[in-house]
Structure formats: structure tokens, C-alpha cells
Image (spheres, coloured by chain):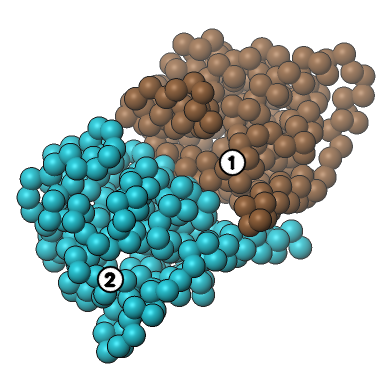
Chain colours: A cyan, B brown
Amino acid sequence: MTIPRDHPRYRSLVARESLASCCREGIVSLEGLAAHGRGEAFDYLLGERTTESALMAEKTAAAFLLCARNPVISVNGNTAALAAGEIRDLQEATGAKVEVNLFHRTEERIEKIRRLLEDNGVRVLEGEAQRLLALSHDRAYCLVEGIFSADVILVPLEDGDRCQVLAGMGKTVITIDLNPLSRTARAATLTIVDELTRALPNITRFSHSLRQEESLELITVHDNAVLLREALGEMRRRLGDALD
Amino acid sequence: MTIPRDHPRYRSLVARESLASCCREGIVSLEGLAAHGRGEAFDYLLGERTTESALMAEKTAAAFLLCARNPVISVNGNTAALAAGEIRDLQEATGAKVEVNLFHRTEERIEKIRRLLEDNGVRVLEGEAQRLLALSHDRAYCLVEGIFSADVILVPLEDGDRCQVLAGMGKTVITIDLNPLSRTARAATLTIVDELTRALPNITRFSHSLRQEESLELITVHDNAVLLREALGEMRRRLGDALD
């Protein structure tokens, strides 16, 4: 199906098609597809646009990544399917390592996602994953020189358990999550309530423009509870508008 | 994966697992899985419970079905996967015909869904589907003695286009849709903003209890715009509570 470019919901429809096609190829899990649907609903309530508070969070994220000693971007199936090119640009702008990290982990899916990322110019961290996180099953796996030793970690579309464990290890955890009520959104150090393919280019842009700044550390000062309240307030306003 | 019965979101998690498994079997489409995710987000905002206004809509739906000359329940992949047993009970209570009707229509999927329904005791309408609705592609297909000639039609989880066309044909269209802002919700004669497996048993229960009533027609008097506003208001309140 070809979606006309002038369709008001063009970006959203293209993203959905791309995820469904990656699901057929085994890159995106069935659970990932349902999770994307949940995100769509929350994005709809945001008006499918980057709010002012999300933009501020994206600037803060860029400052965190630039200040980091060992920044890592954790990529799962949905992120790779939706934004491989955007991940490459962010890696170039920040020098962050990229590690593939899956909730529904199989070696086959890891390989497919790695290939998709590399085809888009991403340098993917190699190595033997070990059970290093305090989580059950396969979710415990990560790389010593990657997620395990990262001081700042960007985990878009993460699950709540892993987000909590990473934050509990003292890491600065930045997440991109459209549901401001989710456990992930509440457990992260910094939550960007925005759609992935809008958020990543903004962080990349800020990473370029902030390079000259001397007061990067100051820019990282933020209040995540306030950011979440702003996002909830936006959604509430939009539901209210629909009532009029 | 076994989900513990005392998990606070047990019903929601079981539903998702069941849909993913039906997706692997070809009963639920990939698009259906993403659509379910969108519904989950709105149900989350409702507090995953039947609101008072939804219960009133369910009572009204029962009255419409009991008053009908030729009531039909239109069943798609998601509905069959989530609620085959509930459809059987509603059919028994109201005498409605059940027709399989798909957005992503293939004979193979129609057959699989029919078998799933029949295995659960549903009597599925047979016949040769024809292009009878003013819609493009496969969505135009339905049965003359079913959807085409129905005066009252229950279409849970329907798409906006088809809902508009059915309403435009002068039918009483009852839908079950968790998004009160959707085109389907706004185009239907009566919109039940509730989760499918909560809504269907309620309609069945009302169908039994209303049988004795003499003033069924009176019960069908309703204002759909008011029902939608109530649902929006509930979601807005919940987002507001989270702000406190």
C-alpha cells in the first residue's frame, strides 16, 4: 500500500507499515508491534508533535551524552526498524557506542538487527554478552564494555524492569517513551515524552549545537517529575479540547 | 510465559498473549495487533474498568439487538481471537446472526476464523459474499442475508470507513471502541467505549434481563455525543489524578 505524502498522518502510517514489514522479517517481535500501537495512542493525545517540554528534555539528553565518559545507545527491534539512520546520525554526533539489546532475545534476531543497523552506517558494538544485570532470563544479558560499564545510557522504548535496574546501578538513564505514566518513564533519570523519529534528530541537532558550550553540566540540571507532569498536562488539554 | 493470576493487569496481559498467538496462526493480522495496542493505551486511561456511561451504552445495545428485525454481529480476527465464547453467549441471548467480516480479507483467514468461532459454539452465517458496500477493495464484501440486510448491526473494533458506510445505509450501527475520538466512535449510532471482553458479557446479561421489559424502544433512546463526552471526561480525570 502506498501512503500519499500529503496524508495528515503520513509519518505515523509509514512508521506502522515499516514496523509490520520488519515484523514479517523477524526484526520486530509481535509484542513490539502491540507496544508500538500503545505508543501511537499516546502520540495521538500529544497531537503527534514535539512539545516544548519534550524539546527541553532532548536538549538535556544531548548535554548528558556529550558530558559522558562512556555513553551507550541501547537499540532494540522497534528502534532499529523505525530509526536506523537516526541512530547513525546520533552516534556520529556524540561518539556513543551502540549495543543491540533485546527483550525477546534470540541470536538470530540480534544478528538481523545488527545487519540492519550496519547497512545504515551504524557501528555496532561487538563482543560476548554475559548475564550481568539483576534481571531474570535473557534480559540480564549485556556487554561489559557497553551497557554494563556505561555511565550515561540512552534506552529508547525500554521496558520498566530493565530501566529500573539500570537506574539502580547508578547510571544516568535517558529514555524515550510516549507514555508518561509508564514505569519506564517514572524510573528513568530523564524521560523524553516524544515519538522516536522526532526525538532522535532533535538530540542529534542539539549535540552539534551544544559542542561549543562550556557549561554542559549546567544544562543537564533538570526535574524529571516536572517534565512528566508537563506531558500529562498536554494530553489532558487535548482531551479537554475534544470535549468542547 | 505464564502470567500469575494475581497480577494487577492479568486480563490485559492474557488478552495480549492470546492475540499474539492468534497472530502466529494467521487469525489476527499484524495491523490488528498494532490496533490492539492502541486500544490498550485508551483502556489504561479508563482505569481498565467499565465506566457508568459505558454500562448504560451496553444496556442500550441490548435493547437495540432485542428490538431488531434482523440483528447481525460482524466478527473480525481480533474479536474472534479475544472473545469467541462471549460472541456465542451473546448470539444465544439475542438470536443475532454472526458474520465473519475482515479488513484484510483472504479466504484462508475467513476459514480459520469461522473454525475458531464454530469450535466455541458460534453458529456462523454461510453464503457467498458479494461486493455490496460502497467501499474500495475487499472491504466491500458481505452477505446479502447478513450485514447487507441487517437493520441493527454490532461491529466491535470496526474501521472508520466501513462504520460510516453502514450508518449511511440507514442501519443502527453499534460499535465497541476504546478510542472515543476515533472516526468509528463518532460515526456509529451507539458507541460503547469499553474493552471487548468486558462489554460483550454485559450486553448479554442485559439481553437476558431486558427480555421481560415492554418498553424496549424507550431504552434505545440515547445521545451518542453525550456518551463520548463522558468517556473523554473519564480519561481526562485519570490523567488529572496522575498530575496530583
Instruction: Give coordinates of residue B10: x percent, y percent.
Output: 50, 27
For residue B104, above or below residue A3: above
Question: Dot 2 lies on which element?
Answer: helix
**Callout 1 secondary element:** helix
Q: Find residue A135 and report its image quarter.
A: top left
Q: In which quarter of the image is the C terminus of chain A?
A: bottom right
**CA gap, disc 2 and disc 1:** 36 Å
Query: In the rendered image, is residue A2 in sight?
Result: no
> Quick check: B80 left or right of B192?
left
Find disc 1 in the rendering and name its residue.
Answer: B43
**Which residue corresponds to the image point at 54% horizontal and 66% vertical from the top-left?**
A226
Pick whichever, B97 or B31, lies toward us. Answer: B31
The residue lying at 22 percent from left, 65 percent from top is A71
Which numbered marker is on residue A65? 2
Q: Mark 2 lies on which chain?
A: A
Q: Is residue A110 left or right of residue B166?
A: left
Q: Tell me which residue sits at (70%, 24%) in the image.
A: B202
Disc 2 marks a residue whose amino acid type is Leu
Disc 1 marks a residue whose amino acid type is Asp
- Residue beneath the point at 18% across and 56% down: A149
User: Marks 2 and 1: same chain?
Assistant: no
What is the quadrant of residue B200 in the picture? top right
Q: How crowded is mark 1: few (under 14 residues within 10 Å), some or many (20 or more)?
A: many
Q: Is residue B197 visible?
A: yes
Using the image, name the chain to which the residue with label 1 belongs: B
